[in-house]
Image: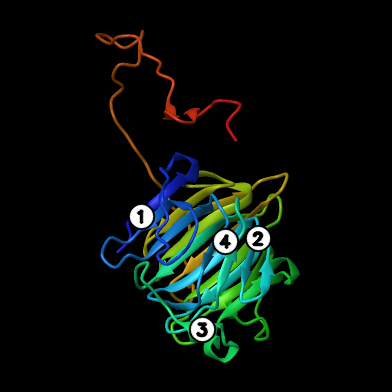
Amino acid sequence: MRPHVELIDEQDLLWHTAELPHGRGEARQRNLSYDEENGAASLKVEFLTDWTIPGGLHAAQTEWYVLDGKIDIGGRILGEGGYWCAPLGVRTPRISVAAGTSILLFREYADWGFTPDSNADDQMATEGLVVRDVNAMEWYDVIDPVNGSPMDFNRGGTPVPGLFIKLLYRDPVTGFYTRLIKAKPGWREHPLAHHPVYEEAYCLEGEFDYNFGRMKRGQYFFRPAGVRHGDFTAGEEAGCTWILRCDGDLVDWYTENARVEMKGTPLNWGEGFPGTEPPVHIQPVRSRSTGTWLDPGYQ
């Protein structure tokens, strides 16, 4: 099982040699989250040189989302916003990647195992492969899950004002899905929520505040089922857009009037409290590589 990761900036993660067997070229990865039992993972991958891999079969359900650069998958060219998914048992054709390209790579149910297969360049052999140009897709209003299915836009229900999605992939059996979500500037949802499925997201642009802090571009969370979160407020200027995945249909269980109360006796607060010392002010540091949290040059 993957651990709870909330909230992490990908710039604070180390680079590792990319887990891409049978690929030719040089690539590196940052591990956003990692299941040490079965090798499932969510990764930021950067291709340092031109890179190719023959057609074949991945051990895991595998998804790529192009952050920038260019890839060629079976003759189809994808740039920023390009996406493909090979569900379990679906082969992928030959893939070529231009140097400098960066992607989000998601593995589900298994590790990096890959078996080359010369038949995978045949279109019939790759039936079930999902390839999308996200920029050519339309945004749809999110449907209130209390009154209608959030995954079915034809069943009616009540739209959630200011929240929109692009559905990239959904398993019709398990409900597993990957989608983009966009919140308009200032969008707000105040109750705490939790779900019977895991939820993970990577922020693509904008920002929003919630009970775990402020999420900005390049930041990520992986939240196991049952973790309460919420009181969302999207940024006033650009709102927020993120790619979000769940291992089943998302059901929102809300908690209204949530309250956390902490009490205690003041200690070491400085003058005015007998027997205490003046407080020592320490500037927090994000990491040795990026400097302090409040560094105005940090992006």
User: Disc number at residue 70?
Assistant: 2
| Marks 1/4: CA–CA distance | 18 Å
Q: Residues within 10 Å of mark 1 (few under 14, many from 20)?
A: some
Q: Element type at marker 2?
A: loop
Instruction: Tell me if residue 34 can be seen.
Output: yes
Q: Amino acid at mark 3?
A: Ala
| Marks 2/3: CA–CA distance | 21 Å
**Is 125 situated above or below 162?**
below
Q: CB of mark 4 within 8 Å of CB of mark 2?
A: no
| Marks 4/2: CA–CA distance | 19 Å
Point out the frontmost of discs 2 and 3.
Answer: 3
Q: How many marks?
A: 4
Mark 1 lies on residue: 4
Which callout, 2 or 3, points at the residue further toward the start of the chain? 2
Q: CB of mark 2 within 8 Å of CB of mark 1?
A: no
Which callout, 3 or 4, points at the residue further toward the start of the chain? 3
Which callout, 1 or 3, points at the residue further toward the start of the chain? 1
The picture places residue 250, in percent across and down from the top left corner, at 49, 72
Which callout, 4 or 2, points at the residue further toward the start of the chain? 2
What residue is rendered at 31% in x and 22% in y? Answer: 266
| Marks 2/1: CA–CA distance | 32 Å
Q: Amino acid at mark 4?
A: Ile
Mark 4 lies on residue: 243
Point out the frontmost of discs 3 and 4.
Answer: 3
Which callout, 1 or 4, points at the residue further toward the start of the chain? 1
Q: Residue furthest bottom?
A: 124
Mark 3 lies on residue: 120
The picture places residue 34, in percent across and down from the top left corner, at 35, 58
Q: Quadrant of residue 19?
A: bottom left
Q: Amino acid at mark 1?
A: His
Which callout, 2 or 1, points at the residue further toward the start of the chain? 1
